[in-house]
Image (cartoon, helix red, strand yellow):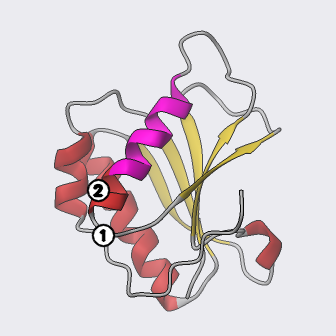
Amino acid sequence: HPAQIQKEKRFVDAEALGLALKNEEHGAATVINDGTYEAGALANQLVVGLIDSGWQAGGNNIKMGDPDFFPDSLTVEVSSNPASAGDHSIAEAKRLIAVLKRQGVEANLRFTTLAFPPNFMRIKVRGQ
């Protein structure tokens, strides 16, 4: 996957995100940003929208000074080894990315060798 860098202003309507995902299978996510204002604001909107939809989501996670950790403007990372047959994290991540795209926010799906719990993803927000 080439890096996906979004140049125009990003904004997530948390209420619309919550409504779009409400009747879908819910996952869990931790949202991590690079400590810049823009990334922190976007991460907060994502967490609010995900929680509104019924997801378990945690934010206020900051990882500064590690550009390699943030390959894209917005990365949705899932484990390359599903935790179980009932782990639908890849489908949930693709659905989330599609919903964000309808709001004009580009995100890249990436796989990690880390073992995650079922239906869990790590969302990485890099500042512009």
Residue 93 is inside the magenta segment = yes
Give the side of residue 72 with respect to residue 6, left or right. Answer: right
- Between residue 72 and residue 18, name the one nearer to us: 72
Q: For the N terminus, which image quadrant?
A: bottom right
Please give the residue where the numbered disc 1 appears in the rendered image.
Answer: 12
On screen, residue 126 above or below 8: above
Going by the numbered disc 2, the residue's amino acid type is Gly
Q: Secondary structure at mark 2?
A: helix
Give the side of residue 25 with respect to residue 14, left or right. Answer: right
Name the residue located 58 percent from the left edge and 73 percent from the top edge: 73
> Residue 22: x and y, percent?
21, 38
- Between residue 25 and residue 32, name the one nearer to us: 25
- Spatial CA distance of label 1 from label 2 is 8 Å
Q: Nearer the viewer, mark 1 or mark 2?
A: 1
> Residue 56: x and y, percent?
41, 41
Upstream in sequence: badge 1 or badge 2: 1
Going by the numbered disc 1, the residue's amino acid type is Val
* Region in magenta: 88-98
Give the numbered dot on residue 49. Answer: 2
Name the residue located 48 percent from the left edge and 79 percent from the top edge: 40
Q: For the C terminus, which image quadrant?
A: bottom right
- Magenta part, dominant SS: helix
On screen, residue 22 above or below 33: above
Q: Secondary structure at mark 1?
A: loop
Asked which quadrant contains residue 65, the reply is: bottom right
> Residue 108: x and y, percent?
57, 57
Name the residue located 70 percent from the left edge and 35 percent from the top edge: 79
Residue that protrudes farthest toward the top in the picture: 85
> Residue 78: x and y, percent?
64, 40
Name the residue located 41 percent from the left edge and 74 percent from the top edge: 42
